[in-house]
Image (tube, coloured by chain):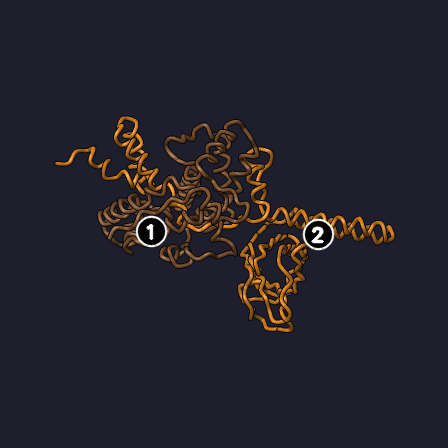
Amino acid sequence: MTTPHDWFIEHRSAFVIRSLEPEEERSFNEHLTGCESCRTETARIERELAWLPMAVPPVTPRPGLARSLAEAALGTGSRVPRWAVPVSLAASLLLAVGAWGWALQSVRATRAELASVRDTLSIIRDAAKVRFASITMDNHQGGVVLFADERTHRWNVVVYGLPTPHAGEVCQFWFITDQGMIRGVQVKSEPSLPAFLTLSMPNDTSHFVGAALSLEPAGSSGQAPEGPLLAHLIL
Amino acid sequence: MTRPAPRPPDAEQARAAGEPGARILTLEHEASLQARLLARDERALLELIDLATPWLLGVAQAMLSDQDEAEEVVQEAFTIVWRRVDLFDRESGRLLPWLLRITRNRAIDRLRARRRRRLKTERLQAYQAFGEGWTAAREPNEASRPGWHVHESVHAALRALPEDQRLAVQLAYFEGLTQSEIAERLGIPLGTVKTRLRLAFDKLRTTLAPIRDWAL
């Protein structure tokens, strides 16, 4: 004859691995408060299965993650989205370009340059949609961030952390539309510097739904990627 | 046939297997780390992050299939450890397994929240997770990473399970499904799921018990 306690005995492992239904889990937790044998046994199961998560192989953290984890745990900072780093780099770069121009060019030219910088940054600030995708290539970990300003129909795109493509290859930007893909510009990637692009929507009646990056043979001009896709973003 | 009991490597063996200068989490080192964490030594936290992050990220990413979410979960785990290390009881377990448990529980919470919001998308095919790629080193020197011998032993224990039990473990333990969700996913009776899981975890407990005090 089975007793109500048998149910708890039978489900100890299921409780430890959290495969009980939420109501069962609550009931088991309540039971534990008054049952020494179940407490002891579940603790034992927990110890015996302690290393089970390590069946999964480790993942090498991206550069900078350890620091941001420490800052977040210590309360000295918070983990910022990965796209914020290249964006701030790009913004700094733009401001540096603006400052450099100010020193070398006439006031008139400088004003135009700064207006351009301000305009570009406004796309970031006013972007209605921001999308991010990570890219792994030749042991480099990079990413692409897209800021879509629907008001001006322009996109700012930051590509960072990508190695220079092999000889005979180029990194190609694509617009994804409901009618298919439209070839955009080539992206000049360097691992140490983010590439920053401001793109206007092609004069097309298609509905733009996203963007993609691919590696293409140099000189190719097809209207669809031929090489491997590095990343895609859907708005 | 009874599987031979795994041989626990001592610190020297583990060190010899590790990268030059790699830190090994022996029982003594772990006790020292815990004491330093309790004393609010920030360098102890950095050491723990250095040592544990690859394994925590591995678990979180395998479960969530999302790098950003996995990093958030790992961040939450370290925040809990730093703020509540006083809750950790060395008598009832080890420091890294405690972190792994926190990480896995957080990942399960997120998976269930996703399901509640009906935003869950089809993720990795369940069986791929236990594919050959899990044993092969995927990065240079990965096999010499501290803890790799634990990974190999645990993985071997899982591979030794019958296929149907291994799949049930995969869905329950690494995808966070409840027993009834597994029954629904596999189209089998709930009682069968319970039996498979019970048999699988009985075997795993027996196989893994000898390695519970291994140095990492």
Left-right relation of A68 to B69:
right
Residue A56, image x and y in percent? 42, 50
Q: Amino acid at mark 1?
A: Leu
Residue A23, disc = none
Badge 2 density bin: few <14, some 14–19, many ≥20, Cα 10 Å: some
Quadrant in which the C terminus of chain B appears: top left
Write the residue at 72% across / 50% down: A93
Residue A151, image x and y in percent? 64, 52
Left-right relation of B76 to B212:
right
Q: Amino acid at mark 2?
A: Thr
- For this orientation, the residue located farthest to the right is A106
Badge 1 density bin: few <14, some 14–19, many ≥20, Cα 10 Å: many
Question: Secondary structure under badge 2?
Answer: helix
Q: Disc 2 and disc 1: Cα gap in Å?
A: 54 Å
Residues at marks 2 and 1 on the same chain? no
Residue beneath label 2, please? A120
Residue B185 appearing in the image: no
Quarter-of-image position of residue B124: bottom left
Residue A124, image x and y in percent? 65, 49
Identify the subunit bearing mark 2. A
Left-right relation of B196 to B151:
left
Give the colour in which the image draws chain A. orange
Residue B52, image x and y in percent? 49, 42
Residue B32 appearing in the image: yes
Question: Secondary structure under badge 1?
Answer: helix
Residue beneath label 1, please? B158
Q: Which chain is rendered brown in the image?
A: B
Write the residue at 60% across / 34% down: A76
Write the residue at 26% across / 28% down: A35
